[in-house]
Image (cartoon, rainbow, N blue to C red):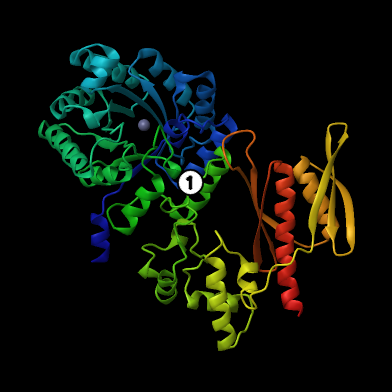
Amino acid sequence: MKQEENNEIPRAIIFDTTLRDGEQSSGFHMLPEEKLQIAKQLSKLGVDIIEAGFAISSPGDFESINQIAKEVGTPDGPIICSLARAVEEDVEAAAKAIEPAHKKRIHTFIATSQIHIEGKFKKTKEWVIEQAVKAIKKAKTYVDDVQFSCEDFGRTDKDYTVEVVTEAINAGATTINLPDTVGWLTPSECYEKVKYVIEKIREKGLDAIFSVHNHNDFGMGTATSIEAFKAGARQIECTINGIGERAGNTSMEEIVAILKERNIGKTNINTQLIGESSKLLSKITKIYPQPNKAIVGKNAFAHEAGIHQHGVQQEKKTYETMNPEDYGVKSIITFGPRSGRNALKSKFESLNINLTEDQFQTASTNFINKSDKLKEVDDADIISSINNSEIPIHHEFISYHPIHNNGNYEVEVKIKTQDGEKSETSSGNGQVDAGIKAIKKLIQKNIELQDFKVSSESPGSDSKGITKITISKNSWKVVGKSQDNDVVTSSFKAFIDAINRINFIENYFKN
Ligand SMILES: [Zn+2]
């Protein structure tokens, strides 16, 4: 019975365009070796098709697609695809670039909405169909697998779409993409429109795999793609972290999770690799998804409010609709003034601190008062709430002095400790690294640097540098913070602040 039910769930083809639509968006450009790394990860992840680039757009993009076709387009690997306008030279370049792949696809497109036909081409609807047919026929001379897109389908007349698609299929297109290029349609409009086109085509005795490629201009990319799938589209185009032109594309992790958790569709994606794929892309592009991003955002499975913490501790499903581990990410409990007493109690337990009921009552009251004034709370803040103690400043930054040594970075750092002033010199791959190493020598502590973030207070060059450094020792984790007109100084101060916080915890356990 179970088996039969499963068999009824349709298979969704995942067409990834992280390396084309995502890569061409502002701030997301990647080097060829980085693109190759992403392509390898996409293959591991189990995507069906990798749109590796737009071959004619630049020699670099051509080379990159070619390299991906060679190295990732193996017999068991995904289909490798290049984009091409409905122009002969584009199709030729695409064909050449994907040539080494075992499974290859040419994806050609032309805009079909009146806004584009009149405003961009200054041509007629008939001209558009002619261009499309010519390009598809040309592509067919190189590959069997040809995808055709009616760009701006979202704002294209539906009966004209049927006309274009009919000719495209007759010319040999095997996948028909109906993209909402500017994210215009609401989910129900998308459902109706996609359904209409598919039905009309099938009434003519024609068929193809229908696809969607929906943008997120109004935040509806994922919603419209899911509706299109319900309407019969079987291929969904998407990107990791939802990157893409303007407000981005349909996000792969969201699509895959909805299909899976709501039993709407099956994919070939190894969902446990989603977390690491998202991280790899962020690491390469240096752009991280916003904390509240579904599935892969830092807060996607973080619980801070007491009621929620209590809920997930009793029964995960109260506030977690899916198991984060299934997506290679973790559920976390964070602390703030609205955290619950139960969560605080288990936090003390996990820190190996046993408090009597009276001590816990006091600590809990202190913690609420204290955390109300803080933006974020670390282990030192939690422990300091037991006796409402201040975190003492054991070490204080005095100054640093860069030493020029034949292009090597060497920095001398001077700090104040309880035994007076001390200084130490070290080298590193930059001033910050050299100085941090010098401070480590001075303080002699076994600590692990977990995170290092520098941001600026405002856009100007006169802005203050804000540094946040997370370090850990044993199972303790603390965050040192500082700001200064000089970024290097602010880094050293934040590091020393973090060390003072670790010191405080160590002394608590000594006494
Ligand atoms: Zn797009």
- Image quadrant in which you'd find residue 212: top left
**Tag 1 secondary structure:** loop
Q: Residue at x 26, y 16 (%)?
A: 119
Q: Is residue 394 left or right of residue 88?
A: right
Q: Identify the image quadrant of the C terminus.
A: bottom right
Q: Is residue 3 left or right of residue 496?
A: left
Q: Residues within 10 Å of mark 1 (few under 14, many from 20)?
A: some
Q: Residue at x 49, y 52 (%)?
A: 275
Q: Is residue 435 left or right of residue 405?
A: left
User: Is 300 in front, or is 493?
Assistant: 493
Taking 331 as reference, is 219 above or below it?
above
Q: Identify the image quadrant of the N terminus.
A: bottom left
Q: Which amino acid does the dot numbered 1 rest on?
A: Pro
Taking 6 as reference, is 407 above or below it?
above
Q: Residue at x 71, y 41 (%)?
A: 486
Q: Residue at x 24, y 45 (%)?
A: 227
Taking 105 as reference, is 128 above or below it?
above
Q: Is residue 424 left or right of residue 131?
A: right
Q: Position of residue 360 (x, y in %)?
A: 57, 83
Q: Report the image quarter containing ligand 1.
A: top left
Residue extending farthest to the left is 203
User: Is 175 in front, or is 475?
Assistant: 475
User: Is 229 in front, or is 114?
Assistant: 114
Reading the image, the residue beneath label 1 is 289
- Image quadrant in which you'd find residue 450: bottom right
Q: Position of residue 494 (x, y in %)?
A: 70, 53
Q: Position of residue 226 (x, y in %)?
A: 27, 46
Q: Position of residue 224 (x, y in %)?
A: 27, 43
